[in-house]
Every structure is written in C-alpha cells, then in structure tokens.
Amino acid sequence: MTRLAKGRYRVTNARGGTLTVGSGNEDETFTPVELLLTAIAACSAADVDYITAKRAEPTGFSVTMTGDKIRDEQGNRLENLVLKFDIAFPDDEGGRAAAAVLPRAVRQSHDRLCTVSRTVEVGTPITAGIVDESA
C-alpha cells in the first residue's frame, strides 16, 4: 500500500491489481470498513457460486453484508454482522438442484470455507510494528 494523499492510498496485490482506498469523506473510494465487509461477502459469494454453479448458472445473484459500527470500551469495531444471499436459479432440473444445495453451500462457507469470515469469527491477533524502528 502506498500513500497518494492524506487519507487516500493505492493497494497493489502480488498480481499487479490495484485498488484505491480512502476515508470516504471526499469521494467514492471504499473505506477500510467497507473493504472488510466486501471481503467477507466476496469470499462467501465465491464459495457459494462455485458450489451451486456446478448444477446451474444463477438467473440472479446478489449478496448483502451489513454491520453496525460502534465505539465502546474496546474501541471502534463492528457488531451485528449479517450476510444475506439473494440467489435465483432457472426453473429446470439443474436450477432445482442448485437451489437444493444452496442452504448447505451457505453453511459450509460460513462454518469452514471462507477464510475471511473464519478469521474474523475465530479472531486472530495482529502484530503491528515499524520496519526500521531506529528511523
């Protein structure tokens, strides 16, 4: 991640993809909190998509991820995280098969497959430091 301006950063992944992140005050860039919610939704969406699309391509596929930002004695954080899938399949044999595995796919993603939501739910310590502390 590199700084572009006050509160605005460019993130580059190992494959060369870029994303601009901001504070959300001056423009349309995603905030870090929005990116966290997006990461949870995208991770589970991919799990569910790969499982159900083996049976049928969806006719509609949307995912909503919400949470309430709070400040308490533990600091700023999110609570009441809710992930909702709204997926439709064709009314044919493949579509019915995909719809039948949808609840299991959502459970599997939540309980075992999605690295992002599993990390958030299980809780993993983060070590923060400075590259050259003598600087």
Image (tube, rainbow, N blue to C red):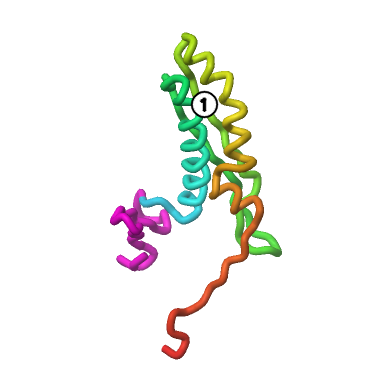
Residue at the extreme front of the image, as rendered = 54
Q: SS class of the residue under badge 1?
A: strand
Residue in view at x 54 percent, y 49 percent: 116
Q: Inspect the image, locate mark 1, and give the three-letter code of the amino acid beneath it.
A: Asp
Report the span colored magenta: 1-28
User: Percent x, y for residue 114?
Assistant: 55, 44
**Does 39 sit left or right of 101 as displayed?**
left
Residue in view at x 61 percent, y 43 percent: 112
Residue at the extreme top of the image, as rendered = 92
Residue in view at x 36 percent, y 51 percent: 29
Asked if the magenta segment contains residue 13, the reply would be yes
Observer-nearest residue: 114 or 41? 114
**Does 2 sit left or right of 47 as displayed?**
left
**Does 114 sit left or right of 59 as displayed?**
right
User: Percent x, y for residue 10?
Assistant: 33, 60
Observer-nearest residue: 94 or 80? 94
Asked if the magenta segment contains residue 21, the reply would be yes
Observer-nearest residue: 26 or 84? 84
User: Percent x, y for residue 11?
Assistant: 35, 59
Q: Which residue is mark 1?
A: 86
Residue in view at x 35 percent, y 49 percent: 28
**Does 111 sit left or right of 95 as displayed?**
right
